[in-house]
Amino acid sequence: MNLDRGIVERVFKEEAIKPHLIKYYHHSTDPEFEEKMLNIIGLYLNPPDNAIVLSVDEKTGIQALDRTQPVLPLQPHGKVKNIPFEYKRLGTTSLLAALDVHSGTIHGRSEKHHRHQEFLSFLKSLESSYRKKGREIHIICDNYSAHKHSKVKEWIESKDNVFMHFTPTHASWLNQIELWFSIMSRKVLKQGVFKSVRDLIKKIDQFIKNYNENAKPFAWTYTGYPLKVK
């Protein structure tokens, strides 16, 4: 039986059916998924007394893109902002960032590489920042090899106030820093024009400074799917 195209379109619209769209997924097969997940959510919702919880990760390969022609700004009478299609690649940087989960503030550092050396140096700077407060530091991160490097493990074991918590395999979305990376990408990188890598780093640093002036914790909910801000 052949149905009129208009009928099919109306049914699809009424039932919110979108056969042209697809989504990719990857379920975690980590046998310790529930234990790790509950541990991390516990740190978010009910952390130890006098503890700092830091959500840490790297955003790698951030490109400094310059446009080959001027950007035309938003103008009256419905003229939208115009960004040239062509661009020039001027280099990349990697951003190491830590979200202080319960204050909402961000610590950030741009590096040329994202090896265990840079990660360990960043951890040491975080520990130094909070050491004077005499508080436990709980660090949440994913399973990237640099995070589990022997040098990192040795340093963690040498500290009685620093604890590492790893997200389940293929579940780095449990890490709240990913929410902030999404915000930064939209507001700084998506339509950004950068004259050099140094210019890119400067604008990222300025965004972090401005963000911290009005920082607040994420209000989020966990439903078995990636974290979502309420």
Image (spheres, helix red, strand yellow):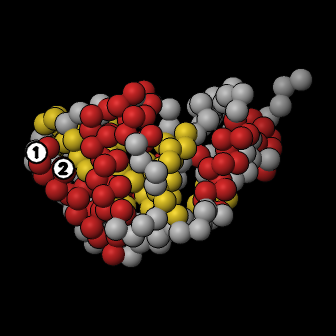
CB under 8 Å between callouts 1 and 2?
Answer: yes
Q: Secondary structure at mark 2?
A: helix
Answer with the quarter of the image where residue 26 lies: top right
Most extreme residue toward the bottom is 214
Crowdedness near tag 2: few (<14), some (14–19) or many (≥20) residues, C-alpha within 10 Å: many
Q: Quadrant of the N terminus?
A: top right
**Which quarter of the picture shows residue 129?**
bottom left
Q: CA distance from mark 1 to mark 2?
A: 6 Å
In the image, taking residue 83 as reference, residue 51 lies left or right, namely right
Residue for badge 1: 196
Residue at image mark 2: 200
- For badge 2, the amino acid type reads Leu
Q: Position of residue 202 (x, y in %)?
A: 16, 56
69 horizontally vs 229: left or right: left
Instruction: Look at 66% across and 48% down and name the residue there.
Output: 39
Of 218 and 160, which appears nearest the observer?
A: 160
- Asked whether residue 169 appears in the rendered view, the answer is yes
Q: Secondary structure at mark 1?
A: loop
Residue 119 is marked as none
Residue sitting farthest toward the top? 1
